[in-house]
Amino acid sequence: MKIWVTSLADYNNGQGLAFGKWFDIEGVTSGDEIGDMITEFLEKRTKDSGELHEEWAVHDYELPFKLDSEWPDFNELADTLVAIDEHGEDVVCSAIRCDIPI
């Protein structure tokens, strides 16, 4: 399960999605883990480009469920991934489609 994150500084400067990165989030157990991955990516973009990169967006994903926003709540995302590990993809995705809390 993956998310594609891009730096909005790159995106807004007309570089589109050229400087995004796929993050493998399978096995993640907390929102902080996802946030740390993205922070590391943005810090590297800042260092490599010499320009400040601090805003991001999720512009693509490979997940068995839909994200509601380009800026998903990482804790909710991690909780959903943990639920999939514990209960299986079919059960969790069915619950999500039926608006049943997981």
Image (spheres, rainbow, N blue to C red):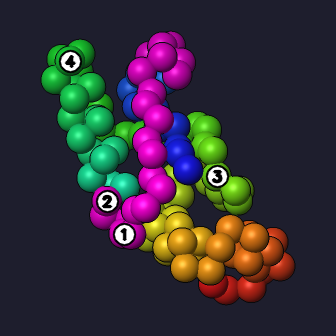
Amino acid type, residue under disc 4 in the picture? Asp
Q: Residues in magenta? A: 13-33
Identify which residue, 3 or 8, lies in the foreground: 3
Mark 2–mark 3 CB contact (< 8 Å): no
Question: Against 101, is 25 above or below?
Answer: above
Residue 17 picture location, percent across and down:
52, 22
Q: Which residue is mark 1?
A: 30
Q: Estimate how packed mark 2 is, as few (under 14), some (14 to 19) or many (20 or more) residues with alpha carbons within 10 Å.
A: some
Amino acid type, residue under disc 2 in the picture? Glu
Measure how far apart labels 3 and 1 are at the Cα level: 17 Å
Mark 1–mark 2 CB contact (< 8 Å): yes
Name the mark on residue 1: none
Toward which corner of the image does residue 92 lie, by quadrant? bottom right
Measure how far apart labels 3 and 4 are at the Cα level: 30 Å
Q: Which residue is mark 4?
A: 48
Q: Residue at x 31, y 59 (%)?
A: 33
Measure how far apart labels 2 and 3 are at the Cα level: 17 Å
Name the mark on residue 63: 3
Q: Residue at x 22, y 29 (%)?
A: 44
Asked whether residue 52 appears in the rendered view, the answer is no
Q: Residue at x 33, y 44 (%)?
A: 38
Q: Residue at x 45, y 27 (%)?
A: 20
Question: Against 95, is 57 above or below?
Answer: above
Measure how far apart labels 4 and 1 are at the Cα level: 28 Å
Question: Against 81, is 20 above or below?
Answer: above
Residue 56 located left or right of residue 91: left
| Element at label 4 | helix
Name the mark on residue 33: 2
3 or 4: tag closer to the N-terminus: 4
Amino acid type, residue under disc 3 in the picture? Leu
**Screen quadrant of the C terminus:** bottom right
| Element at label 1 | loop
